[in-house]
Image: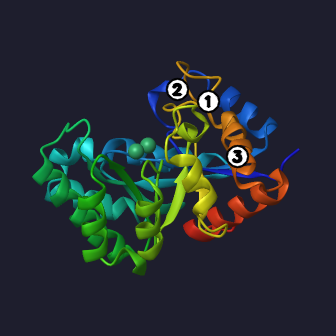
Amino acid sequence: MTPPLFDTHAHLHFPDFAEDLPAVLDRARAAGVTRFLTVGSDVDNSRAGIALAARLPGVWASVGIHPHDAASADASALAELERLAGAPRVAAIGEIGLDFFRDLSPRPAQEVAFRAQLELARRVGKPVVIHCRDAHAETLDILAEGRVGDVGGVMHCFSGDVGIARRCLDLGLAISLAGPVTYPSARALPDVARFVPGDRLVVETDCPYLPPQGHRGQRNEPAYLVLTVARVAALRGEPLVALAERLTANACRLLGVDGR
Ligand SMILES: [Zn+2]
Ligand SMILES: [Zn+2]
């Protein structure tokens, strides 16, 4: 049995889990995954994440507007988000960032929403959860400009190479590895898993998305986090138990939670 793991990026309050969340959480706990950050992607589901965190032990919430929904980030949405950021058990602002792969919101709107939410994070003094897809140069520029190191944060579901990982670390961010590190086609991710210093690494499922190898094509869930941790331990040549302990300590420190 590995030490308790922290899934630093899950969407437990999304409709995908509405039917069977208690069973999902039972399987997670049986697998040793006992702490969760449930991440919002718009104002309404950020509110739902807060409600879930309020009633379930071991769950914290993150509130934010995803780049896909950036067009909705008007002044009133941002004001409401700032109010929500003060709710109990809100540990972070996110997910925020840029997604130039799917381009579901116009790029200028994505950049405006990203900058505004970085400022919001500074005002409320909480770390940020960053989503970045096919937009590393632009994302890193905005993070540097916004002095993200003052609040800290995590590059979630890291998809870059070692050079980009180094720049994220220089900005003061942690790196989060998700299911794709287990894929045979993982490209640069094995090198990244070996490169990131042990005190700057966290893990996540991003469930219901991105299941690890062996569960591809299914709904992802927190119990599968163990597969990602096992792969990272093998890549780093570290004992699973020692790595698991460190990953959880890193997550608690990053999110400013005491682990209860
Ligand atoms: Zn994301
Ligand atoms: Zn996500």
Quadrant in the picture for residue 237: bottom right
Which label is found at residue 178?
none
Position of residue 38 relative to residue 126, above or below, is above
Q: Residue at left 57%, top 53%?
A: 191
* Residue 28: percent from left, percent from top: 72, 36
**Residue 196: in sight, yes or no?**
yes
The residue where tag 1 is placed is: 21
Residue 18 image label: 2
Front one among 257 and 242: 242
3 vs 1, front mark: 3
Contact between labelled residues 1 and 2, with CB atoms less than 8 Å apart: yes
Measure the alpha-carbon separation of dots 3 and 1. Answer: 22 Å
| Residue at (44, 76) in percent of width and height | 170
Q: Do the residues labelled 3 and 1 touch (CB within 8 Å)?
A: no
Q: How crowded is mark 2: few (under 14 residues within 10 Å), some or many (20 or more)?
A: few
Q: Residue at x 51, y 31 (%)?
A: 208
On the rendered structure, is 243 left or right of 144?
right
Ligand number 2: quarter of image:
top left
Q: Position of residue 80 (x, y in %)?
A: 27, 57
Which residue has dot 3 on it? 229
N-term-proximal mark, 3 vs 1? 1
Distance in Å between CA atoms under marks 3 and 2: 26 Å
Pick the quarter of the image with the N terminus.
top right
- Hey, what amino acid is under mark 1? Leu
